[in-house]
Structure formats: C-alpha cells, structure tokens
Amino acid sequence: MAHPTYADAETIAAARAIAASRLESHLAADGELVQKLADGRWILTRERRTDEGGVVCFHTDITPMKLQEEALRRSEQGERVARERAEAADQAKSSFLAIMSHELRTPLNAVIGFSEMIEQKLLGASLPRYREYGALIRRSGEHLLSLINDILDIAKLQSGKTELRLEPTDVVRVIDDAVGLISKQAQVASVVLTCHSEEGLSLVQADPVRLRQILLNLLSNAIKFTPPGGKISVNAGQESDLIRIDVSDTGIGMSVEDIPKAMEPFGQVANTLTRQYQGTGLGLPLAKSLVELHGGRFEIASAPGVGTTISIFLQGFGGGVAVEATVAASAG
C-alpha cells in the first residue's frame, strides 16, 4: 500500500504521526513500503533484518509500473464511460423509434382510412364530405412529409452531407416569409404571433431557404408548446456586426436542467414517451445545427411556466456584393 510522506503533512502533529508510523514499519523490518515522493516518483522499499541485528533497506524506483497502472485504470474508466454512453444512446434511439412508430402510424391510418372511404364510396357516389376527407388526407400527408424531412435533415447534418447555398440575404424578408407561412397555424392554435425588425439591418451571408427553415422550426415549436391565448414574438436587431433574431413565447417553458436534453436529437425524445405533444423533438437540434453550419450562434433561455426565448446570432456585413458559395457541413 502507499504510505503518506512528509510532503502530505499539513501540521506538525500529522508529521509526527507519519514519523511514528514509519519508525514502526522500520523496526519490524519484515514488510514492504510503497511511497509516492513529493516530486511524483514512486519508491518501493524492502527492509530486512540482518543476523547482526541491523536493518538493510532496498529501494526500487517503480514509477514506470505505477504510470502503467494509472494508464490502465484510466483506460478501463474510459471504456466504462464509453459503454455507458453507448447504452444510453441505444436506449434513446429505441425510445425514438417507439415515438416515430406512433407519429408515423397516426397520419398513415388517416390517409388509408379516408382514402378507402372515398374509393369505396361508402357515403354515396359524390358528397361534399369527401372534400373534407380529401383535405384531411392532404394534411396527414404533409405531416408525414414534415416528419420524414426532419429525420433526413438531421441525419445529413450528422453525417456532414448538408450543403448551404450562401448569398446576401435580407433577414427581414426571410422573417416575413416565415411568419406568413406559419400564421395560419398560429391562428388555429389561438396564439398571438407578432414580429418586429429594426430598420437598416445589415444583410447576412446565408442560405435563405435554410434560414427560413430554421425560423419555421422555431415558430412551429413555439406554437406547439404555447397554450391558447399565449403570445409568440419574433424580433430582429443589430448588435455591432451581428444580426440577432429572437423567437420568444409564453409557453410551458423548461428548466435549466432540461435544456441540454432538448438540444440532443434523441435525448429529448427519450424523455417524452408519455408527452401530450406531437412531433419528433428534432426541431430545436435541427435549428441549432443549421445555425452553427452558418457560422452563427444559438442560445436558449427558458423557465417553467414562463416561456422560452431562442436567440440566433448571424454575422452581418455592410454593403458590397457577396460572392455566392456552397458550403458543406463537416462531419462531426
């Protein structure tokens, strides 16, 4: 075993205790001592009594052996951590598949059921109700397409295959487009959606399609978790050479501890098997990954029962014409 050295003693009493322990071992002269010196070296001391009554000490530097033991211990610890992470990831993916099974099966049942009713004319040769069924089939199909697109997008981002078509982009125009596209959904959910942008904002070098996708994901997420009568706002402003976009809501919010889970592609889903809200839970991780692919910053602040604010920071540039470019995501 490793015995304390004088370097470990913080008081005189501790030093005396160490000296007494060492003297006792020396007088016994029939054991081995392993000590770590103040300079970090490890010494093995063997003491043997001679026929004349004296004591012979043999000192061996065992530092390399101790370093190997420490490396082995760290390796085993690393393997254990990696195994635990792999098991957690496997559990998260299993939960994700369980969620996806439900999410895909629900609209598919609607598509199949209503289309069979129309095909077999169960309600008559031609009824206005078939028009309603056709609308339900379309909405179910759009929901399925949205789910599949989110899964494909996050898979491409993780594999480094997402490409951006960068060009000078007017953030205000993209915000207006996203708000216009999502306004009907907000109206159906009975939430108030507003937007405000400062005048004279710089252009940003971005992919306008992907930027609109980011905003749509954030707005859709905000609508989903905001109860009727709540408010959602989109605000854009300039901070030095950065363009800041805030998407705020008065929804259910989440604790500080839950934010990291919500930002993991599978972590959030794994903890929401009994949730009441639809969706894959990929909206926030997908938006964050796309923002970072643009070289931007993604921040989130939230509190239970208060709401959530997500802030996006993108590099602006003043004047001039930027060169169109294609940027591919790097594999992470």
Image (cartoon, rainbow, N blue to C red):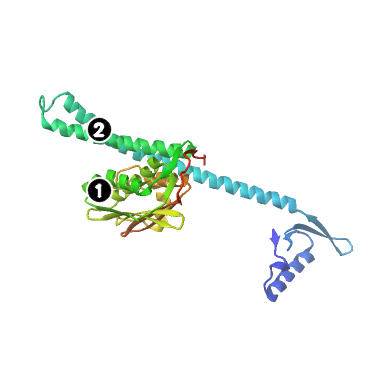
How far across and down, in percent of the image, does residue 280 sit?
A: 35, 42
Using the image as rendered, state which of residue 311 and residue 317 is in the foreground. Answer: 317
- Residue occupying the point 40% across, 50% down: 262
Please state which amino acid type lies under the numbered disc 1. Ala
Left or right of residue 40: residue 185: left
What label does residue 109 carry, if any? 2
Left or right of residue 5: residue 248: left
Q: Residue furthest right?
A: 52
How far across and down, in percent of the image, does residue 251 sit?
A: 30, 55
Q: Is residue 54 above or below residue 315?
A: below
Quarter of the rendering containing residue 164: top left
How far across and down, in percent of the image, does residue 319 sit?
A: 45, 49
Specify the quadrant that holds the N terminus. Answer: bottom right
The residue labelled by disc 1 is 186
What label does residue 7 carry, if any? none
Please state which amino acid type lies under the numbered disc 2. Asn
- Residue occupying the point 35% across, 45% down: 217
Q: Mark 1 or mark 2, which is nearer the start of the sequence?
A: 2
Q: Residue furthest front?
A: 320
Left or right of residue 177: residue 119: left
How far across and down, in percent of the image, does residue 70 sit?
A: 66, 51
